[in-house]
Amino acid sequence: MSNNPDLRYAAKDLRGFARTLLERAGARGDIARDVADVLLDGDLLGHTTHGLALLAPYLDELEHGRMAKAGEPTVVSRRRAAQAWDGNRLPGPWLTLRALDAASAMARECGTGTVVIRHSHHIGCLAAYLKRATDKGLIAIVQSSDPAVAAVVPHGGLTPFITPNPIAAGLPTSGDPILIDVSTSITSMGYARQQMRAGRQLPGEWLIDAEGNPTADPGVLFNEPKGALLPLGGLDAGHKGFALALLIEALTAGLAGHGRADPPSGWGGSVFVQVVDPEAFAGIAAFRRQLDFIADRAHKTKPRQGSEPVRLPGERGLQRYRDALARGVALYPAILPTLLSWAEKYGVAAPTPIS
């Protein structure tokens, strides 16, 4: 196993490697399969901090009993188009896929379906779920928050009190879907940690130090006295990211009934999954006609001098996805070395590079 950045691995080999490690760690077969699929899809889409980079931490959580290896969610509340679940600390990717299935079934019947989950474990890359819905002509919205983590300051504040609170949405068109996946902070803890370990600064002053000074040094998040992530919009317009983060807190922790008002229960998440069937409204053909027009207008916009042509959210990710399936996955160099000890521990052969 090498950390050569030029090496590529077959997607099926990485998927099998991840699934086998999870199974050897005790995860039930279907859970191991789904978690491996979602993590790999994160890397295929280019989300290198929320793909297989999470596998080693997940294995550690399984080993120490902080992530459930088997079981089912408990349905706390159920109506025709809405459900609330207790995830019982089950792996987030498996739970979120089950929620997406349930919300899709409700949407086919009622036009929309929503599942909220409390006591889920971490759910990985939100964009990895979206195409499963858009391929069926459905809109999917996924949001999450982690009540145990405080990393982002409120606009104008110094004390971190909230997570980056990501939101993702998949919108079907006549061609590739639009795949939105953004956090309500300028960047994520995962990306800042990745850049710090690589000895790099962030692209912009996306953080503040302990005294409130803007900085691009990711070390301020991990070294005492600690700084914090700025909300989306930064020092000048962070009220926008702050407001969106509060909305996501309400739709995840608020609707699920577990959040920052409760004692921390470990790394995990409160999750919101909603699916909308355009056929229940003006119809999928009308929906696609409108989105196709918007996409075409965006593509035809004259780019600013020195900039690349305008692209839609998810466009580059889907290009990477297809390229990785065709030519192999070029993993971020630090990922596979973190799995060496786990592969040795469980007697799992490392994937062999194909180039």
Image (tube, rainbow, N blue to C red):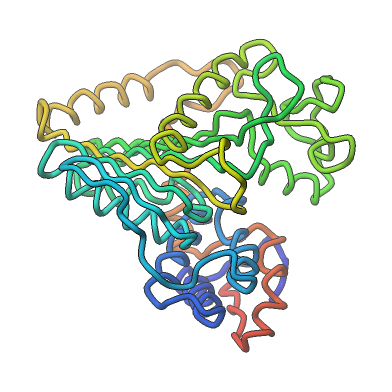
The quadrant of the image that shows the C terminus is: bottom right
User: Against 117, is 225 above or below?
Assistant: above
Across the whole image, how many numbered discs are drawn on residues? 0
In the image: residue 62, left or right of residue 310? right
User: Against 107, is 247 above or below?
Assistant: above
Residue closest to the eye, 195 or 189: 189
Q: Specify the quadrant of the image occupied by residue 291.
A: top left
Please provide percent x and percent y for residue 314: 43, 39
Please provide percent x and percent y for residue 22: 52, 75
| Residue 314 visible from this viewpoint | no
Q: Specify the quadrant of the image occupied by residue 223.
A: top right
In the image: residue 267, left or right of residue 4? left
Going by the picture, which residue comes out furthest to the bottom? 347
Residue closest to the eye, 288 or 296: 288
> Which residue: 71% across, 72% down?
2
The quadrant of the image that shows the N terminus is: bottom right
In the image: residue 174, left or right of residue 222? left
Going by the picture, which residue comes out furthest to the right? 224
In the image: residue 287, left or right of residue 328? left
Residue closest to the eye, 140 or 81: 81
| Residue 102 visible from this viewpoint | yes
Please provide percent x and percent y for residue 312: 41, 31
Please provide percent x and percent y for residue 212: 82, 20
> Which residue: 43% across, 72% down?
70
Q: Specify the quadrant of the image occupied by residue 280.
A: top left
> Which residue: 32% across, 50% down?
76
> Which residue: 52% across, 18% down?
243
